Amino acid sequence: MATFVIPAEVQSHFDKSELVAAIAQDVQSSEVLMLAWMNREALELTLRTGEVTYWSRSRNQLWRKGATSGNTQRLHSISYDCDGDALLLKVEQVGAACHTGERSCFFRAIEIA
Amino acid sequence: MATFVIPAEVQSHFDKSELVAAIAQDVQSSEVLMLAWMNREALELTLRTGEVTYWSRSRNQLWRKGATSGNTQRLHSISYDCDGDALLLKVEQVGAACHTGERSCFFRAIEIA
């Protein structure tokens, strides 16, 4: 069983019932894949199982990434930012991260002319 | 003068007075540097000037990155995600992105044993 301690800076947001933002980055290519959200339970499940689980704000429930699509994210490492309200997950992405079938959710650029 | 169109998916969040999350990634190293927030004015200023400007939720005002520290972010490109509530900015970071002096705000890992 994996052991870990939720950092106080991150816990302080959970204590206020705030979600923290979670950025998933491909551990091999360094491509940023998606941005989603975590509550304490999602973060603990992710750390405990090594399978990335988010909190779905639209469905208001835990969401194990790839549970239906098979496009899972295996956790490699997690960092947290200076004010503890954002996490950076390095992951091994199976297939596409985006529900559209694109590898990354950030597949469209704003054109600047 | 740079010309651009704010994508409808992103604009829909501004229409609801919601901020969008903005991930800054080093265009050379692909390191994720920080996560901050943008309203429409911040995004337009960023696109128009090429100097990254966020919306500070704590100070409730526009915040041109590096305005006081000199640690500016020069915009290279911007993508937006599938539901239009997150932006990925590739930037040329001058000095440290983090107010602590670290290059990235994500400088601490959650240890898993």
Image (spheres, coloured by chain):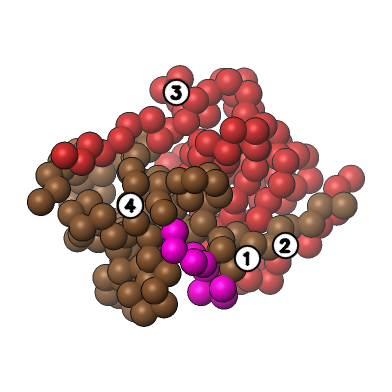
Chain colours: A brown, B red
Say yes or no: labels 1 and 4 on the same chain. no
Q: Which residue is mark 4?
A: A75
Query: Which residue does the image show at 49% across and 25% down from the upper left?
Result: B103
Residue B10's tag is: 1
Residue B6's tag is: 2
Query: Which residue does the image show at 22% across and 51% down from the upper left?
Result: A47
A8 to A16, vertically: above or below: above
Q: Which residue is mark 3?
A: B102
CA distance for labels 4 and 3 = 24 Å
Neighbor class of circle 2 (other Cα within 10 Å; few <14, some 14-19, many 20+) is some
Task: For mark 2, give the secondary structure.
Answer: loop
Say yes or no: labels 3 and 1 on the same chain. yes
Q: Is residue A103 left or right of residue A113?
A: left
Which of discs 2 and 3 lies nearer the camera? The answer is: 3
Q: Chain of mark 1?
A: B
Q: Amino acid at mark 2?
A: Ile
CA distance for labels 2 and 4 = 34 Å
